[in-house]
Amino acid sequence: AFLSGVHKKNNVSCADCHGKSIAVDDNETALNKNCKGCHGGFADLATKTKEHINPHKSHLGETNCTACHKGHVASKAYCNYCHSFAMKIPAMGTEKESSDKKWVQETSKGAKDQKSARTESADVVVIGAGGSGYVASITAHDAGAKVILLEKMPITGGNSMLAAGGINAARTRYQERLGMHDDPADMVKETMKGGRDKNDPELVKVLAYKSADAVDFLVSLGADMTDLVRSGGVAVDRTHRPVGGAAVGPHLIKVYRENAAKRNLDVRVNSEVVQILSDGNGRVTGVQVRGKHSGLYTIKAKAVIDTAGGFAANNELVGFYKPQFKETASSNQPGATGEGVALAQKIGANVIDMEQIQIHPTMGGETKVLISETVRGSGAILVNHAGKRFVNELTTRDKASAAILAQPEKSAFLVLGEDIRKSNVQIDGYIVLGLVQQADSVAELAAKMGVPADALTATVESYNKAFAAKKDPEFQRQDIPRPVNGPKYYSIWVKPGRHHTMGGVKINTEAQVIGKDGKAMTGFYAAGEVTGGVHGWNRLGGNAITDTVVFGRIAGANAARFVKDA
Ligand code: MEZ
């Protein structure tokens, strides 16, 4: 029933898939090369795929074929870790027959007393191939270090791959080109205010003052960050994203993957770190890894960078720190389960703000699809089941989520018009996903939403007046870039869901991990969502990507320097 059997029936031999050796490396390199050799690459396959949702042209980009198509166990569409697409793939099995989920759980158990079968060495090991992992690896590599980047999941990208909004940066060339004045000092103030002043102010200063450099770095790698939009809690258009409002994450991960390949970086998927090794005195000495095929092995390294991400996909851990959020849907990728924090704690790292878990106001109804804050930034309004606005759409996430959860239905609608849809290409994606109601008039839209037509019509009229007057007397929204206009009107049913874990490993401004004794640990660095302190008790939309790039670069550069000096 599995692909191996299907292949055999068609006279495909073991060697046709495996090549000369039956042994499989953790990247499943030969298998993937041979899949593509016979069936074509993603671009070819995308044109042949008949599914409504085209998995060969998705936001996950070009991944290993083996992430979905299995040889000796049932195939499973990787998309369906988060979605429930009714798609058929060859030799698809039941949840039970597919090994992947099981693999993630089994390897997560750790390997306390088990012995490594072999030992390798590197200058720098990076744990987790999301945005910060790639940035740290590329930076350390370019500074002359031999780097190994490890990813436990079958594909790289982490949560960054799902990032919809953009990267916040102050006083960039793109803002200046538009004649906008922005100041990193304002970014510091707004980030602190958004974080309820619980952020580490020194980390926030680094975030803000290095944010424009971060955008230049991305552009130097080949990224497009030319479009600007506003995020909640910010008084200027500071969120940079690709032209047309395309989602930032898939674009960046594509750029990072290409840059890693260009540099021949050693990137290993299906490779879970089960221990960070240390000398017991706060100095790291490497990691122990469990490869999907190669089993347990050790990599000795002078420096380790922990970029393993947050834990908003881990129901148990979220429930432990914040019981009331346990059953809330999560926008995160399935690998965001928090091992990076536990691994660091085990060797003496301090942690901070672990119970600070962000609820994003707008996830699509009952799905795990995040409806980007940039939709509100582009002009959409939030309307309740009575057809009325009830909150400033550009307030911070904690306040917007609380306002939705205060509605009797604990949900709301985003309502927008044609100009807003056209300004944000992501909305077309939500249409493809079946999350958007469309109508030729506001009254027709109201009927589809099940809200009173006269109330919704009055709400839209009043908002359009506020647009024309550039003043929102009802909710003091600061920026109304577009009206809710026809010919078509749209609505999306939304509910709040778990999005970001603000807490994590404590670091200093050099991205060094701080131990329980308050001292920087030796050779140990961390960046991105695995860390705590940057965002305080509430992260501003667009600041996560800034965090990954700014602190990823600092961690990579410092780890490489440390290795040289050691
Ligand atoms: O930074 C984010 O989490 C973000 C901008 C998300 C989004 O709503 O698009």
Image: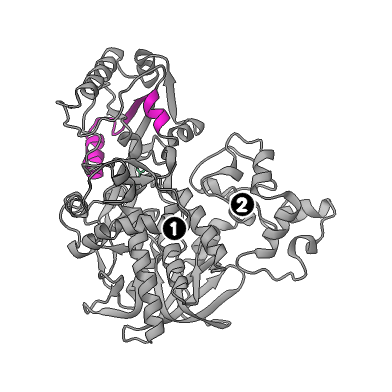
Q: Is mark 2 within 8 Å of ligand 1?
A: no
Residue 501 shows in the view: yes
Vertical arrangement, residue 343 with respect to residue 320, above or below:
below
Q: Secondary structure at mark 1?
A: helix
Q: Is residue 414 magenta?
A: yes
Toward the viewer: 132 or 410?
A: 132
Q: Which residues are magenta?
A: 396-423
Horizontal side of residue 20 vs 326, given as left or right: right
- Location of residue 453 by image quarter: top left
- On the image, the x and y values in percent for residue 131 come to 42, 58
Q: Residue at x 23, y 79 (%)?
A: 519
Q: Residue at x 27, y 62 (%)?
A: 532
- Location of residue 491 by image quarter: top left
**Which of the two labelled residues, at mark 1 and mark 2, occupies the earlier sequence position?**
2
Horizontal side of residue 74 vs 20, given as left or right: left
Q: Residues within 10 Å of mark 1 (few under 14, many from 20)?
A: few
Q: Amino acid at mark 1?
A: Ser
Residue 89 shows in the view: no
Q: Is residue 539 magenta?
A: no
How was the colour assigned to the protein in this rendering? one colour
- Location of residue 303 by image quarter: bottom left
Q: In this figure, which residue is indicated by the disc labeled 2?
A: 68
- On the image, the x and y values in percent for residue 188 come to 19, 55
Numbered disc in front, either 1 or 2: 1
Q: Residue at x 21, y 61 (%)?
A: 205
Q: Which mark is residue 220?
A: 1
- Give me the C-alpha separation between circle 1 and circle 2: 33 Å
Q: Amino acid at mark 2?
A: Cys
Asked whether the beta carbons under mark 1 and mark 2 sit within 8 Å of each other, the answer is: no
Q: Residues within 10 Å of mark 2 (few under 14, many from 20)?
A: many
